[in-house]
Image (cartoon, rainbow, N blue to C red):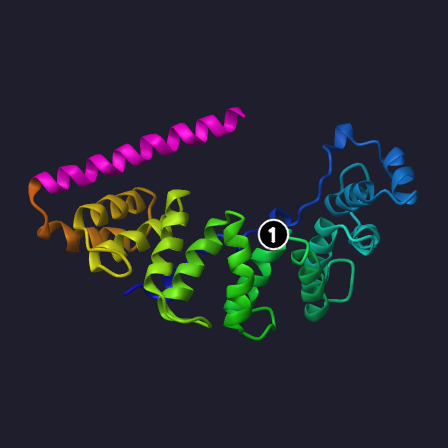
Amino acid sequence: MIPPRLLSSTCCALLCAQISFSVCCADDLNIEALKKLAEQGDAQSQISLGGAYFKGQGVPKDYQQAAEWIRKAAEQGDAKAQYDLGIFYRHGYGVQQDVAEGLEWYRKSAEQDFVEAELELGRLFYSGDAGIAQNYPEAAKWLTKAAEHGKAWAQNTLGVIYLYGYGVEKDPKQAFSWFQRAAEQGDAKAQSNVGQMYAGGTGIEKDLVKAYQWLTLAAQQGESTAPKMLAGVEPHLTPDQVVEGKRLAAEWKEQAGKKAAEKAER
């Protein structure tokens, strides 16, 4: 079975990577023009000005000023600003730290389908960190929205939720489906999980060749549990089946590379 520790930790990124400011490079930033538009109530300019103060681009770094401008956009209903303000309150940047207030701003943003807010709400309710009570049904609700928007971490975590019945009815088939969707995006944890599901015949018909394929892909990305699983699967395969598993992995990797290149060209 797949232990919960197999969850990817990609959401534990640095704060600056989380914040979604649409701020220009300092050389391109006309602060006075931006201030004028922001003072006239333009939400995008307010967000960019907040980002400039947060990052110290074109102005001295000032978290309080950053929070004030982001608040103005958030109070106008801008979902991105609401998410950013939630981060400010959670971490106490330019405001008194208030986790509950941060959660409310995340919720306002998520209710407008802002995917980063959906993901963060799901993560917080799943893990129960930052002083927020663990709540699996709420986690499943928000992670489903983020997963449907294509977030691989949410898809993989939903797989764990359905596999173990955390706040939902156990459903191995649903678990496999979410693992598969994340694995197809190249998520190493999900690829390992798919391989283990195929190896055990959990939620999907047992197929050791496909197990070998997905565990190989996970191992190639450095996923820590995959090599041990591969070592357990390989003795049950014929030499031809091992060759086929490797071929399938190479074929998938080639196709994934082509898709990524095509996406980059758009």
- Residue found at the very far bottom of the displayed protein: 133
Residue 73 place in picture, x, y as percent: 81, 50
Q: Secondary structure at mark 1?
A: helix
Residue at the spot x=26%, y=56% of the render?
204
In the displayed structure, would residue 244 be above or below residue 123?
Answer: above
Q: Main secondary structure of the magenta part?
A: helix
Residue for badge 1: 116
Question: Which of the 4 image quarters holds residue 42?
Answer: top right
Q: Please state which of residues 169 and 65 is positioned toward the viewer in this rendering.
A: 169
Quarter occupied by the N terminus: bottom left
Task: In the displayed orientation, state which residue is furthest to the left.
Answer: 238
Q: Which residues are magenta?
A: 240-266
Q: Position of residue 263 (x, y in %)?
A: 49, 30
Q: Is 12 colored magenta in this rendering?
A: no
Quick check: is 265 in the magenta stretch? Answer: yes
- Left or right of 84: which side holds 167? left
Count the labels in the image: 1
